[in-house]
Image (tube, grey):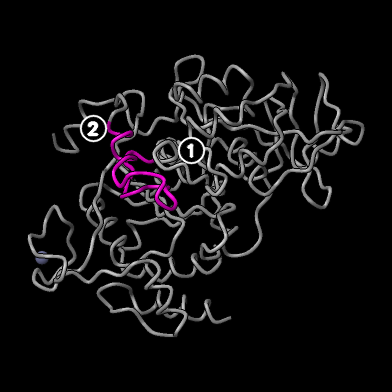
Amino acid sequence: MTISEQMLAGPRLGVPHGGQLVDRRLDAEAAAGLGAGRWPSVVLTGAEAADLRALATGAYSPLVGFMGAKEHESVTESMRLPDGTLWPIPVCLGIPDGVGVAAGRLALRDARGGLVGVVEVAEVFERDRLAEAELVYGTTDPDHPGVARVLGSPARAVAGPVQALVAPLPGPVGSRALTPAQTRAAFAERGWASVVGFQTRNPVHRAHEYLMKCALEMVDGLLLHPLVGPTKEGDVPAEVRMRAYEAVLGYFPPARVLLAALVAPMRYAGPREAVLHALVRKNYGCTHFIVGRDHAGVGSYYGTFQAQELIASLPAEDLGIIPLRFDNAFYCRRCLSMATGKTCPHPDGEHVALSGTQVRAMLAAGQLPPPEFSRAEVAELLIDASRS
Ligand SMILES: [Zn+2]
């Protein structure tokens, strides 16, 4: 089935997950009038603050707040909210010992004590963190960075609808942190009926550029949507990556691409997170989503195609966004072009391929990777950053 046939035959595309875009933003004036100083409060980690922002802007629609016991169990065990809506990963808020939370409101604060949001407390419950690790991440190994965060978070969790102050974020990365409503408006302004989303937490090399261009041959627009929330140690900092993405934009027609930043924590949950990444991009207005090899994986916890297999197994009407599954791309010296195993018959020796470790070593030594692997503009930025 071609993509246009899928679009005619399949579910309505471009509709937010659950039907409506959630908006739980709180303006500063209303926040000041709440009298939040009288409530118990909790200081959010960077990852929790990023989840709060995603909840308030509708990136996590239809969620309106942190999950309770029933939702946690249902999502963990069956990838569904209690009403049957597809949702792959719990979004919870752990409460440290010593914070007394009863019915009423809980103030959410940043590390400097500033009010960033409010939870209308519906429930306080004990979260089964081991079950979450085992079923959502497929492992209880504390060396897995996502599992470490789950197991390191307090067992006691607070649930309920949130409201949050969604202030503009500083710097060039912050100015690209558009809300789902903003990207939807941008797509409409450009007249894009079909938009493919590309998730990344890494610099974009030729291989990723090729996948995006393959997709862009079939749809109206591309949302290059790097995740800029908390990632693990060793990942390239968001400011550096953003400059590298801007350099790559020079190889796309400006009218067909939008570069925006997604503020959300990286969970490294592999297959389940691939589904979350797709649903979030659906909320941002995308109709298609690129799923690569070992999408959202880390180390060797997940099989190469496990994420693609999981997303392909889900009913199209539940997903509501078309996953585009791609194999790894490379430059082939015999084809004289970028290709994948689906399009090139030549042996590996003909392919310009470098491992992540090899690329990092070259950049650290100030060497440019071959132009078939990386655009020089991108590599030069990464060399500068690795030396500063
Ligand atoms: Zn070839």
Instruction: Please report the residue visible at 35 percent of the width from the left and 70 percent of the height from the top.
Output: 250
User: Residue 13's x, y, as percent?
Assistant: 33, 31
The residue at which mark 2 appears reads as 7
Residue furthest bottom in the image: 366
Q: Quadrant of the C terminus?
A: bottom right
The residue at which mark 1 appears reads as 139
At mark 2, the secondary structure is: helix
Left or right placement of residue 212 versus residue 111 in this view: left
User: Residue 284's x, y, as percent?
Assistant: 45, 41
Q: Is residue 15 above or below residue 197?
A: above
At mark 1, the secondary structure is: loop
Left or right placement of residue 338 versus residue 51 in this view: left
Q: Quadrant of the N terminus?
A: top left
**Do the residues bearing badges 1 and 2 touch, measured as CB atoms within 8 Å?**
no
The type of residue carrying mark 2 is: Met
Left or right placement of residue 128 versus residue 210 in this view: right
Which stretch is magenta? 286-312
Instruction: Please report the residue visible at 82 percent of the width from the left and 21 percent of the height from the top.
Output: 104
Sort mark 1 into few (<14), some (14-19) or many (20+) by Cα contacts within 10 Å: some
Q: Quadrant of ligand 1?
A: bottom left
Does the magenta portion include 4?
Answer: no
